[in-house]
Image (cartoon, helix red, strand yellow):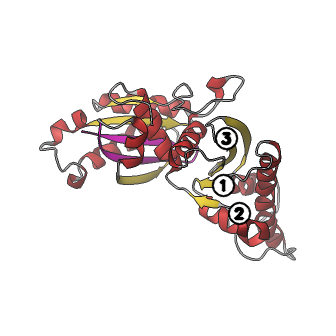
Amino acid sequence: MKRILLLDIGNSTHVLTLFGPVDWQQAAGLAAVATPVLSRTSLPNEQLRPAGVLAEEIRRILEIPSNWPSVDSAVTLADDLAAFVCSVVPALAAAAATVFADLGIQAVVLDSTMAAGVLNPYKEPGRLGADRLAAAAGARLLFPGKDCIIVDCGTACTVDALCADAAMAGGYIVPGPATWLGSLRSGTAQLPSLELQLQGEHGPGRTTAACIANGLRVGYPAMLDGLCRTLQATVFVDRSPMYLFCGGWAAMLMAALKETIPQWTGIAAELSPDLLARGALYMGLSALPAVSPSV
């Protein structure tokens, strides 16, 4: 029985999720669904930090006794642990792999070749981000046989179509809400700094601050709604896909859509915070020889 430490490196944060123990007698898909989460922690993602902070955080996780009830000595923990790295920042993925190697932990860096049954639509398949593929793999795993529109909203927001036959049909990438607001602040003069909120007053503003805040509250959900409607009209003609939301802004964004666009109150939308993590676990387990890739 082995535990898996998943490192999800985004543009702003990295998240460490410890899964385990894995039942190696199960197929990869079943194991990816059934394996419990033992702990999860999120850290700021600053360039050059992983070599120090990441190693320290990994050691902290290794020292929590409740994570290792069947292991007698900390000296043997590395033998009971493997690591999967899912990263949108290649340099940090390489740095993380080095950290794991220095700790004696086997690490697998996930990439677009580890499809876990998802059909990659890219003209250059290697250019599809591992995070988007992991989210699609998670949707296939947790909602098998369903048409899905996957909204993963963090520093960037991706909106991807996954068909019931597990074929991705492309999607869109736009700035996340904080990136939208930050670009406005950094690219203009005399505009105030605001706390980002997607819910609240959304009528026309009568101060500069209100114009900015309400423009985001109305404009961001409207943009996302337009992207989803386009996928519905071009990919899912006469079908009703599920809408799956994940990422740091997911809950707030779902609420904002329902608040500003009445039609969203009747749409089948689900908050799925573990979508990417489960999909990444599935990709990594499928890549290991110890388990079968079949669901």
Boundaries of the magenta span: 1-24
Residue 194 appearing in the image: no
| Percent coordinates x, y for residue 24 in the rendering | 29, 36
Q: x and y percent of residue 73 in the render?
A: 13, 42
The number of callouts visible is 3
Residue lying at the far left in this picture: please name it: 72
Which residue sits at x=51%, y=28%? 114
Disc 3/disc 2 C-alpha distance (Å): 18 Å
Q: For this rendering, which residue is in front, 225 or 189? A: 225
Labelled pair 2, 1 in contact (Cβ < 8 Å):
yes
Mark 3 is on which residue type? Cys
Is residue 275 on the magenta stretch? no
- Residue drawn at x 44%, y 41% is 7
Residue lying at 41% horizontally and 29% vertically, measured from the top left:
108
* Mark nearer the N terminus (3 vs 1): 3
Label 1 belongs to which residue? 243
Q: Which mark is residue 163?
A: 3
Asked if 126 appears above or below 272 in the picture, the reply is above
Q: Quadrant of the N terminus?
A: top left
Q: Amino acid at mark 1?
A: Tyr
Name the residue nearer the viewer: 222 or 11. 222
Label annotation for residue 267: 2
Q: Earlier in the sequence, mark 3 or mark 2?
A: 3
Q: Quadrant of the C terminus?
A: top left
Q: Where 236 falls versus 168 (above or below)?
A: below
